[in-house]
Amino acid sequence: MQTKPLPLKAIWHLVLPLLAASATAAPYQTRILDTGTTFGSPDPYGPWSLTPSFANKPGPDLGYIKTSNTGTGKVEVHLASRASNYQTRTLELGTTFWPEDNGVWQLIDADGDGRDDLVYIKTRNTGTGRVEVHIASAASNFQTRIKEVGTTFLPEDDGTWQMADFDGDGILDLIYIKTRNTGTGRVEVHVASGASNYQTRVQEVGTTFYPEDNGVWQMIDFDRDRKLDLVYIKTRNTGTGRVEVHVASGASTYQTRVQEVGTTFYPEDNGFWQMIDFNKDGVLDLAYVKTQNTGTGRIEVHVATGRN
């Protein structure tokens, strides 16, 4: 018995729902926040981020580490609360640090008290001749330094430096994502353990990624297996014509990519990109703190949900 081919219209009605489901199933397609904040734009005198310690808050605060042109003559920390939709400033103060830009600044809980401390990873012009870690505690309003130490790393700026708990011992480790001039010809991950006071390297490995600097690199637990994964937020020269998220799993020692997807955002570099579980649903979201060329004339926060 010969069957008749389906007419084109019938095929289209079958395929269209599948295409629609596929489109809506992708992560980072839906924005769950687009808002101006209390901060005027531009304000390009230091790094902006959504702060990582917010277990007892409705969501992450907006943090600004102002490292130059400060009113106090010191590095300053400014916070706007998620509870106010970033309209109310909850902290503005000078810290123990004199202004300088010889490394990377980060807000992260270093002492386990649930508050984000001020970390300075000094990568050049150091007194010890090594990359140094300096930490001022949030408990002291960033007036007391609780760590100042040289590390196993010689000074270099061929990638991204970050503090995170790599080995799950509750102590922050020092991570270097080397993105150029690597020995393996790949992007590399180097980790010095906090337990050794950053003297012992517990990981040094090439990854699935070829060296490039078309975006932002970050180590964070993407798949909730308690291992840090390597995330690349590609913000320019993308194949999809959109900002892209690429993830290599820590379980595979960064050899297997577990996500590669275009997002709702068009390519741009007018601010700071990061992955964070913004709405506390257990899935990482894509956040963009836009600091210049904003439509509102304010620093803006944009978040796309990681949910499918």
Image (cartoon, grey):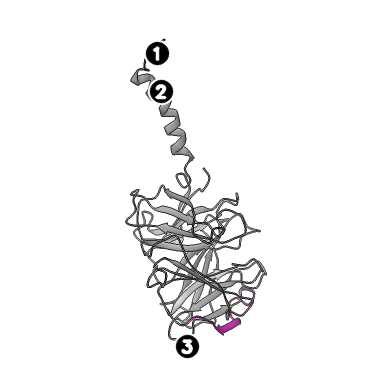
Q: Which amino acid type is marked by label 2?
A: His
Where residue 171 appears, as percent x and y from the top left, is 64, 72
Secondary structure of the residue carrying numbered label 2? helix
Residue occupied by mark 3: 129
Where residue 182 appears, as percent x and y from the top left, is 40, 72
Whether residue 49 appears in this view of the structure is yes
Verify whether residue 152 appears in magenta.
Answer: yes
Where residue 259 appears, as percent x and y from the top left, is 48, 51
For the residues labelled 3 and 2, the Cα–Cα distance comes to: 67 Å
Q: Which amino acid type is marked by label 1?
A: Thr
Marked residue nearer the N-terminal end (1 or 3): 1
Secondary structure of the residue carrying numbered label 1? loop
Q: Nearer the viewer, mark 2 or mark 1?
A: 1
Tell which residue pokes out farthest to the top in this image.
Answer: 1
Residue occupied by mark 1: 3
In the image, the segment drawn in magenta is 139-153
Compared across the picture, whether 10 is left or right of 92 comes to left
Image quadrant containing the N terminus: top left
Q: Nearer the viewer, mark 1 or mark 3?
A: 1
Marked residue nearer the N-terminal end (3 or 2): 2
Compared across the picture, whether 117 is left or right of 41 comes to right
Q: Nearer the viewer, residue 234 or 299?
A: 234
Residue occupying image coordinates x 55% and y 80%: 134
Residue occupied by mark 2: 13
